[in-house]
Image (cartoon, rainbow, N blue to C red):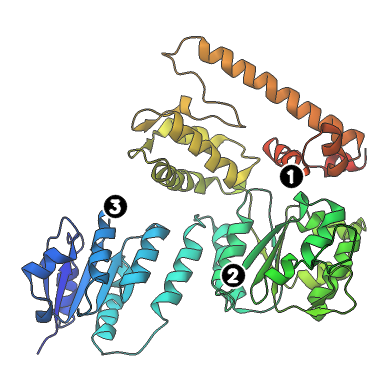
Amino acid sequence: MAHRVLLIGDNQFPLAAILADGGFEAEVVSCRACDWSVASREQRPSSWDLFVATLFESTPQWANLFQSIASHTTRPPVLAVLREGTAAQLFRGVARSADDFIVWSAERQAELRERVARLLGKGENAQSISERLTDSVAISRLVGQDARFVDAIAKIPVVARSRVPVLIQGETGTGKELCARAVHHMSPRRHFPFIPVDCAALPDHLLENELFGHVRGAFTDAHRDQAGLVAMAEGGTLFLDEIDSLPLPVQAKLLRLIAEHTYKPLGANRFAAANIRIVAAGNRSLDEMVRQQRFRSDLFFRLNVLQLYLPALRHRRGDIPLLARHFVERACGEAGTGRKTLVPAALDALVRAEWPGNVRELYNVIQRAVVFCDGPAILPHHISLSGEPPADSPDEDTGGGFRAARERTVRAFERAYIEELLRKHHGNVTRSAAEARKDRRVFGRMMKRYHIDRVVFETH
């Protein structure tokens, strides 16, 4: 006797026919409200061996479906069929309520039948749904089709299974932290903390304390023991961003941490064990820094076991339309606006831009465009590059022009002021921030905003 399968939702793909070819008896229930109770009333759950929820649209309706599924203690297994590019939030909803899932494409017909058979007690076990969902979510934000980019992303699952350090290199804004998080979430350490450290944002004299912590009495204000970021990452991953900013004394102590898996908190009289994995990232060539004796060669060789390189956005211009559309959908969802689309002329402007801030800058530009665009179409005058406000539309008066001119003057002053301070202090960010009477982290963010690299001023 053939197993009976109920397809819930609009059958946008010929799933019923595919399942019928596999020997299953399939029927479709059009459930526009995506409400499990509707399907339960129309068809008795006991009459079916499996429910297949076809969730091709990422709308609030899917939440109602999963809430209804969770409320039923006696029900058949549930298979969720999702579309390519499904939002991470929908993946998490599936993980809580469905028994398995598949991301649909026409080439996966055989796999669909295999998953149905597995849920019906036939076939062999495969990777658990939670593991596959975690992998899908980890990779979902790394968008691109360029061969060099795809080659780097394809290495992530292999790199994640290893225990050795990972070095991720690429310019600022290319997605190094997203890549590091994907490595962590696809690794056996996924259930333990992922602790990011912005090495450039921490003053040199505080960096060691932040990393390794201290014991009571280590210095004047050390009134109690304090764990460092290494201890917080126990069992998980310590992500050292902008590792090329580490001072040489801290590099030496980091070398011991990697080589011997031990460290010593400030003021302690014994070493502590560390069960962590190091993932490091830098936007400058560590090879060149080693030759200049500004980065320890032994630390570089310890870190450079597994390397991932993310190309600059200007080197994969073919991905810009894909990324732009992805970011528009994401920004519209975050802003709660209606759907917006980029007109061809706006896309062309994005493709021709140089993108010194890479993918991060592109996302910022798209966010601004979504905010300033009143209608459903994002036009060229909604696109503002290099931090400039959107250009005036042809129908606006000169008020916008005055504001734009004022903003350009302010930005020109800020950039010149920051560069002059860095030139005066030979690239020392801490001293430059102190003279500007700015917090070092705030000063560092201002440098990033204007794409100012302190290395340019270190030898002047």
Q: Could you say which quadrant of the image residue 223 lies in?
A: bottom right
Tell me which label, 1 or 3, sits earlier in the chain. Answer: 3
Residue marked by disc 2: 184
Q: Is residue 286 left or right of residue 63?
A: right
Residue marked by disc 3: 59
Would you place residue 388 above or below residue 316 in this image? above
Assess disc 2: are there few (<14), some (14-19) or many (≥20) residues with their C-alpha within 10 Å of its C-alpha.
Answer: many
Alpha carbon distance from label 2 to label 1? 26 Å
- Of 336 and 319, which appears nearest the observer? 336
Tell me which label, 2 or 3, sits earlier in the chain. Answer: 3
User: Where is the N terminus found, in terms of image quarters?
Assistant: bottom left
- Of 393 and 77, which appears nearest the observer? 77
Count of numbered marks:
3
Q: Is residue 427 visible?
A: no
Alpha carbon distance from label 1 to label 3? 38 Å
The residue shown at (62%, 73%) is 159
Q: Amino acid at mark 1?
A: Arg
Would you place residue 212 above or below residue 406 in this image? below
Assess disc 1: are there few (<14), some (14-19) or many (≥20) residues with their C-alpha within 10 Å of its C-alpha.
Answer: some
Tell me which label, 2 or 1, sits earlier in the chain. Answer: 2
In the picture, the disc for residue 258 is none
The residue shown at (49%, 38%) is 367
Residue 399, image x, y percentages: 52, 11
Residue marked by disc 1: 441
> Which of pointers 2 and 1 indicates the residue nearer the eye?
1
Q: Could you say which quadrant of the image residue 107 lies in?
A: bottom left
Q: Is residue 106 left or right of residue 271?
A: left
Q: Amino acid at mark 2?
A: His
Q: Is residue 167 left or right of residue 343?
A: right
Determine the secondary structure under disc 1. Answer: helix
Determine the secondary structure under disc 2. Answer: helix
